[in-house]
Image: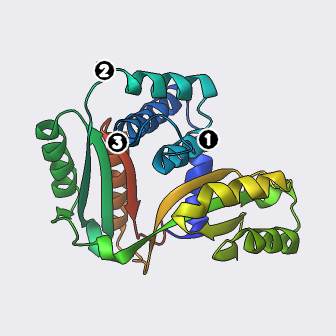
């Protein structure tokens, strides 16, 4: 999605009710649990876990919650979760990638398929749209915080960022995924407090929907996917989402 739309989505996340935020915390907790199981509980040696801790903090997950989740995932009786990835098309040919963490794929897969079918899309095979996206680290700064654009851009590039964009409401710093945490920490140490620092999938091209029906059904598809307890992330290349 475009930088401006992503900024709106970040602000929307931060404005959610307590119940909605709790659901976001739970989803991130599932991702952390999988990372701990696969790479261990130490973020120094487990880069995936380190990125997810950064993501949790960006979404205002309390440190105590993060520590409890890591401890629980490290225990021998922790629930076994499986990472799933679904790819398909929404209305108007919008490419969609859905990432999930589930303890029952026989429940999750039919649910995801039903959303695509119900809202004028179709679920495809793995890889059918993945080539349209590139993994990047994305660090967002609010223009409302009054940072000097040239100073922030210079600090970002010196820290190793691959791109810097000035958008309507935000400054967006792109990094290689492996460098996300190091660059985010370096900028914070230089006095630039970010609003969000997360790994993202950046589309190589975008689709603009012009039909009111397509827009309505695309919104419904995203809404139902994001509301599903097993879904952890939804990526798409819809240009004009709000």
User: Of callouts 2 and 1, which one flags the residue occurring earlier in the amino acid sequence?
Assistant: 1
Task: Provide residue 112's location: percent of width, then percent of height.
Answer: 21, 48
Q: Is residue 41 left or right of residue 223?
A: right
Q: Are marks 3 and 2 in contact (CB under 8 Å)?
A: no
User: Of callouts 3 and 1, which one flags the residue occurring earlier in the amino acid sequence?
Assistant: 1
User: Of callouts 3 and 2, which one flags the residue occurring earlier in the amino acid sequence?
Assistant: 3
Q: Residue at x 62, y 49 (%)?
A: 11
Q: Residues within 10 Å of mark 2 (few under 14, many from 20)?
A: few
Q: Residue at x 55, y 40 (%)?
A: 53
Residue 91 falls in image quadrant: bottom left
Q: Residue at x 54, y 41 (%)?
A: 43
| Numbered-mark total | 3
Residue at which label 2 appears? 76
Q: Are marks 3 and 1 in contact (CB under 8 Å)?
A: no
Residue at which label 3 appears? 38
Residue at which label 1 appears? 14
Q: Which mark is residue 155?
A: none
Q: Is residue 242 visible?
A: no
Task: Provide residue 44's location: percent of width, then percent of height.
Answer: 57, 44
Q: 15 or 187: which is nearer to us? A: 187
Task: Provide residue 172's location: percent of width, then percent of height.
Answer: 67, 67
Q: Secondary structure at mark 2?
A: loop
């Amino acid at each position: 999605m475009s930088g401006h739309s992503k900024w709106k989505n970040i602000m929307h996340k931060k404005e959610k009710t307590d119940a909605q935020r709790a659901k976001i915390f739970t989803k991130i907790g599932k991702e952390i649990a999988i990372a701990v199981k696969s790479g261990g509980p130490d973020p120094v040696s487990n880069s995936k876990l380190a990125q997810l801790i950064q993501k949790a903090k960006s979404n205002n997950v309390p440190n105590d919650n993060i520590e409890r989740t890591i401890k629980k995932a490290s225990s021998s009786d922790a629930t076994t979760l499986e990472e799933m990835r679904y790819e398909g098309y929404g209305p108007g040919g919008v490419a969609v990638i859905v990432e999930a963490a589930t303890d029952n794929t026989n429940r999750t897969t039919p649910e995801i398929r039903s959303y695509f079918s119900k809202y004028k899309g179709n679920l495809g095979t793995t890889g059918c749209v993945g080539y349209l996206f590139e993994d990047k680290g994305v660090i967002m700064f609010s223009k409302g915080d009054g940072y000097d654009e040239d100073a922030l851009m210079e600090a970002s590039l010196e820290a190793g960022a691959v791109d810097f964009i000035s958008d309507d409401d935000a400054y967006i710093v792109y990094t290689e995924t492996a460098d996300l945490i190091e660059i985010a920490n370096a900028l914070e140490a230089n006095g630039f407090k970010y609003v969000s620092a997360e790994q993202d999938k950046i589309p190589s091209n975008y689709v603009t929907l012009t039909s009111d029906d397509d827009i309505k059904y695309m919104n419904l598809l995203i809404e139902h996917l994001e509301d599903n307890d097993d879904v952890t992330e939804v990526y798409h290349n819809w240009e004009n989402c709000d």
